[in-house]
């Protein structure tokens, strides 16, 4: 009986341990390059440090993100499937992050800073790959078609 109890406890420990293991994110492509799960995990950490204060810890965006602030600028949009991030190609997302919105759309005033010199190109790619990894398949497929239209093969 004692041996059976030991086996049962071992089995329970194994089952609990197996359930506690988190699945790694699936690899995604960005600018035609496969981004590995460990790079996506780094992107998630970088997103939390660099982007979440404006775009939300869960990529949900600022409250009332579709309505201009008193200064006329748009609040930070969500990066989940409810926003429009997935409507942009990999190249556009990279350039907006690296150069700021004004660097891509001259004259456009935004609170989005340029991250060139703050984040490396690799870090920007990892953050954007993390964001892509959270989208449902429908949004990922649509965004891949947009990126392919620019010759990126995402």
Image (tube, grey):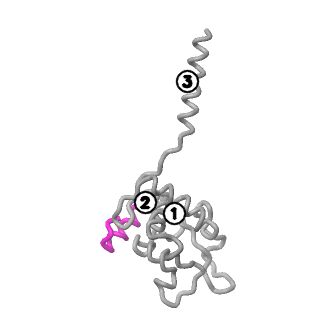
Marks 3 and 2, Cα distance to the nearest angstrom? 39 Å
Tell me which corner region of the image, top left, top right, bottom left or bottom right, holds residue 139. Answer: bottom left
Q: Measuring 41% from the left and 70% from the top, which residue is drawn there?
A: 90
**Mark 2 residue element:** helix
User: Which of the two labelled residues, at mark 3 and mark 1, occupies the earlier sequence position?
Assistant: 3
Q: Measuring 67% from the left and 86% from the top, which residue is drawn there?
A: 71
Q: Which residue is mark 1?
A: 81
Q: Which mark is residue 138?
A: 2
Say above or below: 152 vs 1. below
Q: Nearer the viewer, residue 145 or 45?
A: 45
**Other-residue count near label 2 (Cα within 10 Å), few / some / many at <14 / 14–19 / ≥20:** few
Based on the picture, tell me whether residue 55 belongs to the magenta stretch: no
Marks 3 and 1, Cα distance to the nearest angstrom? 39 Å
x then y, percent, for residue 127: 50, 64
Q: Which mark is residue 130?
A: none
x then y, percent, for residue 98: 48, 76
């Amino acid at each position: 009986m004692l041996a059976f109890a030991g086996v049962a406890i071992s089995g329970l420990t194994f089952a609990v341990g197996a359930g506690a293991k988190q699945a790694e994110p699936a690899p995604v492509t960005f600018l035609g390059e496969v981004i590995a799960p460990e790079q996506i995990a780094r992107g998630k950490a970088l997103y939390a440090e660099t982007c979440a204060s404006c775009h939300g810890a869960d990529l949900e965006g600022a409250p009332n993100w579709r309505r201009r602030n008193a200064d006329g600028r748009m609040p930070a949009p969500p990066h989940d499937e409810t926003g429009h991030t997935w409507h942009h190609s990999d190249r556009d997302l990279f350039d907006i992050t690296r150069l700021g919105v004004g660097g891509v759309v001259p004259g456009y005033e935004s609170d989005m800073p340029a991250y060139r010199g703050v984040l490396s190109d690799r870090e920007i790619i990892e953050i954007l790959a993390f964001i892509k990894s959270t989208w449902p398949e429908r949004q990922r497929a649509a965004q891949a078609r947009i990126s392919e239209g620019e010759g990126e093969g995402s």
